[in-house]
C-alpha cells in the first residue's frame, strides 16, 4: 500500500466513523416511541419516523404561537385504515368516505396543542393531543385534544 | 379569502357554529366551514370541528372537494337525538359529511360569522366575499328546522 492509498483509506475510515457516530447521535436524540402498523406495510408511503417528524414540526409551531412550552414527547405512532381512526381516537369524526381514503398515521404526543377556531377566537391550549396525518400526502387531516 | 400568516397557524375562515349539549356556542359546539390556512399549511379547505363539555376538542378537514371560491356555499348541521350525534355537511353535498358522536341535545343557538385569526407576525388579512347560507336543526333528525342565510360581509378582526 503506497502512502497515497493509505492516506485515502484513513480518510474513508474517518468518514465512515463520522457517519456511524452521527447516526448514533440521531438515534440517541430521537425519543423512543411506540410504533404500530395496522395496515399492510406495502400500502404505506411514510415511515413511522417521518410521521413523527411531521407531527413534531407542527407541535413546535403551535408551541411558538401559544408561547408555552410543554416538553414535546411522542407517545405513540400508529398507521391505521382511515375508517379505523375512531377505534384508537374515539373523538375523531367518522364518514362513509373514510372507506375509500388511504391509511392515516395517528401521532399521539405530550406537547403544546392549541386552537383559536372557537367562535370567540380565544386561544385554548392543551398539554397533550394527537395529529392525524394522511399517509398519501403527508398533510395533516385532523387534530384532537387532549 | 386569504390569511397571509398561514405558516404560523393563522387562518381566515367562514364558519357556522351550533351550540350543543345545552350550552352556548362559545362553550360546547360543532362547527363546519371553509378556511384558508390549515395546520400551518397554505391550504384552502372545508373543515369541521367540535368541542364537548368535557373540554375535548377535535378539528378535521374535508378532502377531495371543490374548493373554488366566489360561489354559494351551504353548510348544514343535523342533530340525531336517537344516537346523540351531529352530522355536518359541507358545501351542500350530502356525501361530504362527517359525524361527531357523543353529544347531548343542541341549543336553539346557531351563529355564523366570517373572521380571521391573525398570528404572529400580525398581517393584514384580505378576503374576497362570498354568499353563503347555513342550516341547522334542533328537533327533527335530518330535517333542518332553521335556516340562516348570510350575505357577503367584511371580515371582523
Image (spheres, rainbow, N blue to C red):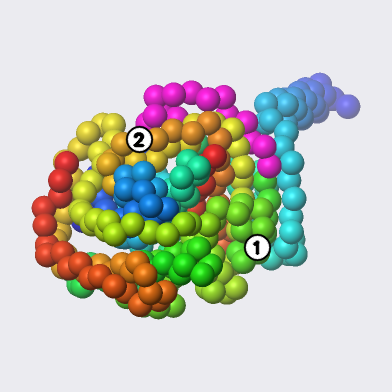
In the rendered image, the quadrant that contains the C terminus of chain B is top left
In the rendered image, the quadrant that contains the N terminus of chain B is bottom left
Q: Is residue A17 visible?
A: yes
Q: Is residue B137 magenta?
A: no
Instruction: Tell me which corner region of the image, top left, top right, bottom left or bottom right, holds residue B40.
Output: top left
Q: Residue at x 65, y 62 (%)?
A: A84
Q: Residue A49: where, in percent of width, then height? A: 66, 43
Q: Is residue A73 magenta?
A: yes
* In front of the other: B20 or A89: B20
Mark 1 or 2, nearer chain start: 1
Q: Is residue B35 visible?
A: no
Q: Residue at x 66, y 53 (%)?
A: A88
Q: Residue at x 69, y 30 (%)?
A: A31
Using the image, determine if residue B102 lies above or below residue A3.
Answer: below
* In front of the other: B9 or B143: B143
Same subunit, tags 1 and 2: yes
Q: Chain of mark 2?
A: A
Q: Work out how far the residue at label 1 is from the one at label 2, CA to CA, in angstroms.
A: 30 Å
Using the image, determine if residue B29 lies above or below residue A101.
Answer: above
Q: Which residue is mark 1?
A: A84
Q: Chain of mark 1?
A: A
* Classed neighbour count for the residue bearing mark 1: other residues with Cα under 10 Å, few (<14), some (14–19), many (≥20): some
Q: Which residue is mark 2?
A: A123
What is the span of residues highlighted in magenta in the rendered image?
A62-76
Using the image, determine if residue B51 lies above or below residue A67.
Answer: below
* Label disc, if present, on residue A27 of the rendered structure: none
Amino acid at each position: 500500500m503506497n502512502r497515497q492509498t493509505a492516506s485515502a483509506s484513513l480518510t474513508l475510515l474517518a468518514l465512515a466513523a463520522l457517519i456511524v457516530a452521527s447516526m448514533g447521535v440521531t438515534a440517541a436524540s430521537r425519543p423512543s416511541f411506540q410504533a404500530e402498523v395496522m395496515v399492510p406495510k406495502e400500502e404505506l408511503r411514510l415511515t413511522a419516523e417521518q410521521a413523527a417528524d411531521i407531527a413534531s414540526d407542527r407541535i413546535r409551531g403551535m408551541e411558538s404561537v401559544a408561547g408555552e412550552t410543554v416538553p414535546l414527547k411522542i407517545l405513540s405512532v400508529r398507521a391505521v385504515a382511515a375508517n379505523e381512526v375512531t377505534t384508537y381516537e374515539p373523538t375523531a369524526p367518522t364518514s362513509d368516505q373514510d372507506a375509500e381514503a388511504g391509511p392515516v398515521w395517528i401521532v399521539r404526543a405530550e406537547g403544546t396543542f392549541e386552537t383559536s377556531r372557537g367562535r370567540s377566537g380565544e386561544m385554548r391550549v392543551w398539554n397533550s393531543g394527537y395529529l392525524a396525518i394522511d399517509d398519501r400526502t403527508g398533510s395533516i387531516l385532523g387534530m384532537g385534544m387532549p | 379569502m386569504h390569511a397571509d400568516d398561514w405558516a404560523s397557524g393563522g387562518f381566515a375562515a367562514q364558519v357556522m357554529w351550533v351550540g350543543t349539549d345545552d350550552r352556548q356556542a362559545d362553550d360546547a359546539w360543532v362547527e363546519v366551514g371553509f378556511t384558508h390556512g390549515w395546520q400551518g399549511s397554505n391550504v384552502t379547505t372545508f373543515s369541521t370541528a367540535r368541542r364537548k363539555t368535557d373540554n375535548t376538542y377535535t378539528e378535521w378537514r374535508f378532502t377531495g372537494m371543490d374548493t373554488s371560491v366566489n360561489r354559494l356555499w351551504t353548510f348544514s348541521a343535523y342533530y340525531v337525538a336517537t344516537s346523540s350525534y351531529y352530522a355536518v355537511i359541507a358545501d351542500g353535498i350530502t356525501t361530504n359529511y362527517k359525524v361527531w358522536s357523543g353529544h347531548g341535545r343542541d341549543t336553539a343557538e346557531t351563529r355564523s360569522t366570517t373572521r380571521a385569526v391573525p398570528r404572529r407576525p400580525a398581517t393584514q388579512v384580505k378576503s374576497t366575499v362570498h354568499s353563503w347560507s347555513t342550516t341547522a336543526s334542533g328537533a327533527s333528525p335530518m330535517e333542518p328546522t332553521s335556516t340562516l342565510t348570510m350575505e357577503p360581509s367584511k371580515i371582523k378582526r
